[in-house]
Image (cartoon, rainbow, N blue to C red):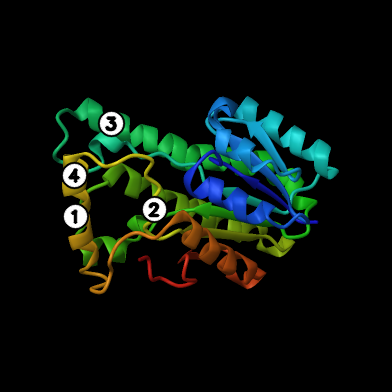
Amino acid sequence: MPSYAITGAARGIGFEYVNQLSADSGNTVFALVRNKATATKLEELGRHNVHIIEADITDTKALKDAAAEVSSRTGSSLDYLINNAAFVEPERDGLTLDSYSSAELLTKDLLDSFNINVIAIIHTINIFLPLLKNGKAKTVVTLSSGLGDLDMTMVAEFANSAPYSISKAAVNMVNAKYATQYKPEGFVFLALSPGLVDTSTRAPTEKELEQFKAMLGNFRNVAPDFTGPITPETSVRMQLEVINRLTVNDTGAFISHKGNKEWL
């Protein structure tokens, strides 16, 4: 009976991971959320094999408590850790590195992105590693982004979303460092881009719509036939197909939901 721990599971891609994995009653799914009060969609699933655990990934004590709860339910093991939780500053996502109103604001966005998208991922992996070592799959998937790929950035001529993109490039190296260390133990560490996914919960503002249209124009430099985002359902289904094909020889890879370097 495989066990999965998924961070950022209250909505979007994280919720869809829980939804699709828990549809198989043989799976045990641990949904980590920042606030149980906002996890109404998870509660509404009403599935006995879903365990909702409150844990902000920037809070190491909360992560340790979450790992202890997982351990108590699985006999001290975990098969899959899916690092889905991430941060992007929505108000300034359209800015370039030289267009911030102040150095202080740029520094804040860079540090916030690095703290959540890199440092918190490292702490999450370290805290769950003892359980993963006792698991059968020994698989850690960290959701990254094609925006963290240097070639994609240059070909798309995409200078926006800098703090987020920089943090995703950094977490790809984190993935490689763990992969190098734990390959002899049979671990698989994967940095996985979900594609461009529509996780919106409201209609976009006029400014956001303009930024989105401009981004689509950039992305068509890479994929001329690209028409727009995919749904969380489609993205997670494709991601799981990739994950289920993984072997130890794939450890350290940075690939997309298509199982290659096609990010869109």
- Asked if disc 2 and disc 4 are in contact, CB closer than 8 Å, the reply is no
The part of the image, by quadrant, that contains residue 111 is: top left
Task: For marks 2 and 4, give the CA distance.
Answer: 16 Å
Point out residue 255 in the picture as x, y percentages from the top left corner.
47, 66
Amino acid under disc 4 = Thr
Task: For marks 1 and 2, give the CA distance.
Answer: 24 Å
- Asked if disc 4 and disc 1 are in contact, CB closer than 8 Å, the reply is no
* Figure check: 260 above or below 103: below
Would you name the residue on which mark 4 appears?
96
Task: For marks 2 and 3, give the CA distance.
Answer: 17 Å
Amino acid under disc 2 = Ala
Q: Residues within 10 Å of mark 2 (few under 14, many from 20)?
A: many
Would you name the residue on which mark 3 appears?
107
Tell which residue pokes out farthest to the right in this image.
Answer: 75
Amino acid under disc 1 = Lys
Apparent side of residue 94 relative to residue 252 in the rendered image (left or right): left
Asked which secondary structure carries label 1, the reply is helix
